[in-house]
Amino acid sequence: MKTNVCAVILFFLPAISIFAADDALQQGPPSVISDSGAGFDTLAGDLPGVVVAKLKPYLVIGDIYVPQGKTVIIEAGAVFLFKSFTAMHVSGTLLARGLKDKPVVFTSENDREYNRASAVDPAPFDWNGIFIHEEGVGSQLAYCAVMYAVEGVTSLTKFIRLSPCLFLHNGRANCIIEGKPQAVTDQPFEYALLASDPSLKGIQLAVLKDPQKASRTIIRSSGIAAGAAGCLMAIIWAGKFNVSSRVFNDMSRIEQGNLAHNSNASWNNARLNKNRDEAALLTGCGVALIGAVGIGWSFSF
């Protein structure tokens, strides 16, 4: 009888092991980030073109970068939890587009408001901060919160926009622009270098490039090219039309000497030249108008 019981146990042991393993897989690995049983996505290195806002924050485990020549958009509601000694470096264009009710948050991994499983209190100097390098011209942070960093935002270029941003519990400084600490309180802070600022002269602003939709950029670039080509064509043919029109009008004068000096063939040739130059002039104006309409339309969708 004992032998039969042992045989039954040995027979069902593999099945019991399978069900136990399956139950463990359903429960998932233990998480040190959230008390809901699901860990956060981790980030390190170059950021993608669009950082999507998710239900849970991103955990930054190594320095993250906006590379030179690249635009990175951060959606409203995205939250970044930075581990110790990590930072964000911006050498391209950063567009952190938060909303009043859905800000973009940059904070410590110990911030219990976003990481309830943290066993450590957040504190200033928990992470290094956001560094905007000289090449980061045009970067914008709208409705963003930067908290518990060594230095909240340090920008080596003044051509950025903060509109508005909240800086709280940062260690050495909240916001430094071109080496100058800004007067930041615990209230939302705004900074923008206006386009009318004389120091903007000579600075290329990427007003035509739209990182959200490539088709807009293509239409705007094509519109500029068409507008420039059309204007140049119109200018050239306007001069030619002025000459050919004057020649045709001179040949069309009803005077005995003029009629005797010019043949019917000469008059027809002058008329054809005038009509050709007029058609080319109108074509140039039309191409320039199409380019202008295309540029305007690209800002409407």
Image: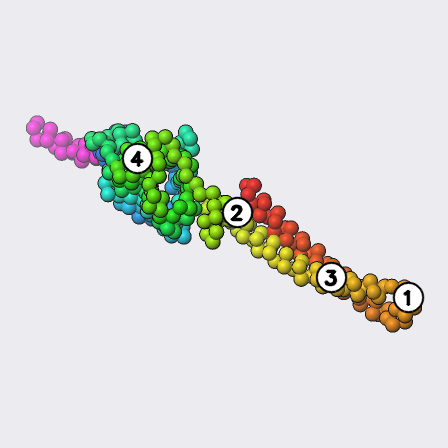
Q: Does the magenta-highlighted stretch encompass residue 81?
A: no
- Asked if labels 2 and 1 touch by Cβ distance under 8 angstroms, the answer is no
Q: Position of residue 41 (x, y in %)?
A: 30, 39
- Asked if labels 3 and 1 touch by Cβ distance under 8 angstroms, the answer is no
Residue type at tag 2: Arg
Q: Is residue 285 visible?
A: yes
The C terminus: image quadrant:
top right
Callout 3 environment at 10 Å: few (<14), some (14 to 19), or many (20+)? many
Cα distance between the residues tagged 1 and 2: 59 Å
Question: For this view, does 49 lie left or right of residue 214?
Answer: left
Callout 1 environment at 10 Å: few (<14), some (14 to 19), or many (20+)? few
Cα distance between the residues tagged 4 and 2: 35 Å
Tell me the residue that label 4 is attached to: 147
User: Which residues are the magenta region?
Assistant: 1-22
Q: For the residue labelled by badge 3, is the local secondary structure a helix, a strand or a loop?
A: helix
Residue type at tag 4: Met
**Along the polypeptide, which appears first: circle 2 or circle 3?**
2
Cα distance between the residues tagged 1 and 4: 89 Å
Q: For the residue labelled by badge 2, is the local secondary structure a helix, a strand or a loop?
A: helix
Tell me the residue that label 1 is attached to: 255
**Along the polypeptide, which appears first: circle 1 or circle 3?**
3
* Numbered mark located on residue 216 in the image: 2
Please say if 15 is above or below 197: above
Q: Position of residue 72 (x, y in %)?
A: 40, 45
Residue situated furthest bottom in the rendering? 261
**Along the polypeptide, which appears first: circle 1 or circle 4?**
4
